[in-house]
Image (cartoon, rainbow, N blue to C red):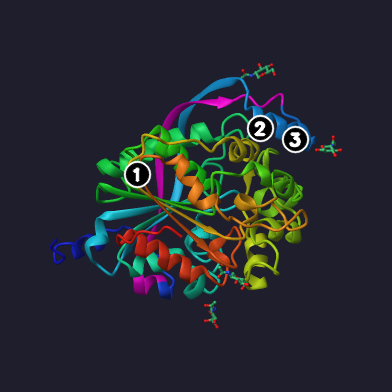
Amino acid sequence: MKHANLSPLLFLVPIVYSAPLEARLAICRDVTFQVSGSAQNRNLSSLNLADPNATLAAFEADAFPLVPVSGTQTLAGTFCEPTVVNENFFSLQVLFHGITGNRGYWNALGGLSTGYVPYQPQNYSWVDVAHANGYPTLALDRLGAGESSHPDPVAVVQGPYEFALYHDLAIQLRTGTTGQLLLPYENLIFVGHSYGSEIGNSMAQLFPEDFNTLILTGFSKSVLPSFFGVVLQTPEPAAVENPAKFGTLAAGYLTAPVELTHTNSFFGSPAQAYWDPEASYLYWVREDVVSVGQFVSVYVGITEAPAYRGRVLVLTGEQDQAFCGPGSPVLGFAECGSLLPDTQALFPNADYNWHSINATGHAINYHYSAQAAFQVAHRFLAGQRYEG
Ligand SMILES: *[C@@H]1O[C@H](CO)[C@@H](O)[C@H](O)[C@H]1NC(C)=O
Ligand SMILES: *[C@@H]1O[C@H](CO)[C@@H](O)[C@H](O)[C@H]1NC(C)=O
Ligand SMILES: *[C@@H]1O[C@H](CO)[C@@H](O)[C@H](O)[C@H]1NC(C)=O
Ligand SMILES: *[C@@H]1O[C@H](CO)[C@@H](O)[C@H](O)[C@H]1NC(C)=O
């Protein structure tokens, strides 16, 4: 590949903002995409979220009637082009955060439109590591988060409709028709966290040609056992909990009101996993929202993806309460054990890789082990295999 003819592209970028470290590694700007799709969402009107036992039974049965949804939405994000130019320049990492997250998850809980200064980015910024390795990144606000559209949180903002929208985005990114990014990207890397990883799993099943490679962090094939621990967070309407930030959102957009129960699910027990308490505090205080539809989608979404033949890396904290435990240390310890190798069952025809990060809970980007996890992900992208 010839590098000399790439640099003029960097000067065509219309608006450039940068924090000092970002400026050293990449040139970043905010972008928005118009995406359309149609899907069969679930009719959730029979669900009684106030009764956890009945809710879990309804998730296990997954017998909700289906309702067609369609339409066009805006997806917002931050696009960064690395200043380190190598053969990875045409491989775009598309980053999908988890529930109550937004694009800031990938950048030390801050940057550009998030309104926050990144916290110790030298420790916690995934995108800085990606840029240092020469990858461009697109950190999205998923549907219903950050600056993206916030349609009906119960009927519309659910997994199936999200998959259709991200499929449209993938086509636009591949064909170079976003009107926002200058290059087409024929190599798309899906990077997810938690529910974002579940989306990658579903994209692999429904649209196996969209993403060449999947990195699924904070993920396994098993999420239902965490339901009772996760609901201990007692999610509340975000508009009530934080009117200054979320006052315009419908009541079906939820957020976690209590730091301790939030930390219990996303970080776990300090006896099992190691992190800086300031990181878990900021993870809570800077949290975004989850729609009721997405909360349901977390628990009914995991699927086998036999048509997917790309490379997959499942990268999860060994003590992940959400995907390897009861959802909160109040209910018991977490341990992935054989769950990560067993998750290969979801990807029977892919090049399946897995790696467990010790002393680490669900929010792997915010534990002391974060840099080690980021290095594993980028060694995987460079071709290394991981089976443990
Ligand atoms: C959803 O199901 C309820 C019955 O539980 C029904 O009254 C309602 O019309 C359905 N909504 C749609 C959009 O189909
Ligand atoms: C939920 O089920 C458990 C047993 O699995 C039972 O002990 C508990 O009382 C039930 N709670 C409600 C509200 O029905
Ligand atoms: C994982 O970390 C814990 C706590 O530091 C330690 O006791 C244990 O030996 C480690 N396990 C492995 C497999 O390294
Ligand atoms: C994180 O960054 C701070 C400040 O630069 C540093 O003192 C600390 O050792 C780092 N921690 C880890 C786990 O890398």
Look at discs 3 and 2 and give the one toward the viewer.
2
* Residue 187 visible here: yes
Residue closer to the observer: 181 or 310? 310
Q: Are marks 3 and 2 in contact (CB under 8 Å)?
A: no
Q: Is residue 176 left or right of residue 17?
A: left
**Residue at 41 percent of width and 47 percent of height:** 32
Picture coordinates of residue 81, whole percent (x, y): 32, 61
- Asked if residue 132 is positioned above or below residue 219 in the image, the reply reads below
**Residue at 30 percent of width and 60 percent of height:** 383
| Residue under label 2 | 59
**Residue at 55 percent of width and 50 percent of height:** 339
Magenta stretch? 22-46
Mark 3 to mark 1 CA distance (whole Å): 34 Å
Helix, strand or loop: magenta stretch: strand
Mark 2 or mark 1, which is nearer the start of the sequence? 2
Q: Secondary structure at mark 1?
A: loop
| Residue under label 3 | 49
Mark 1 or mark 3, which is nearer the start of the sequence? 3
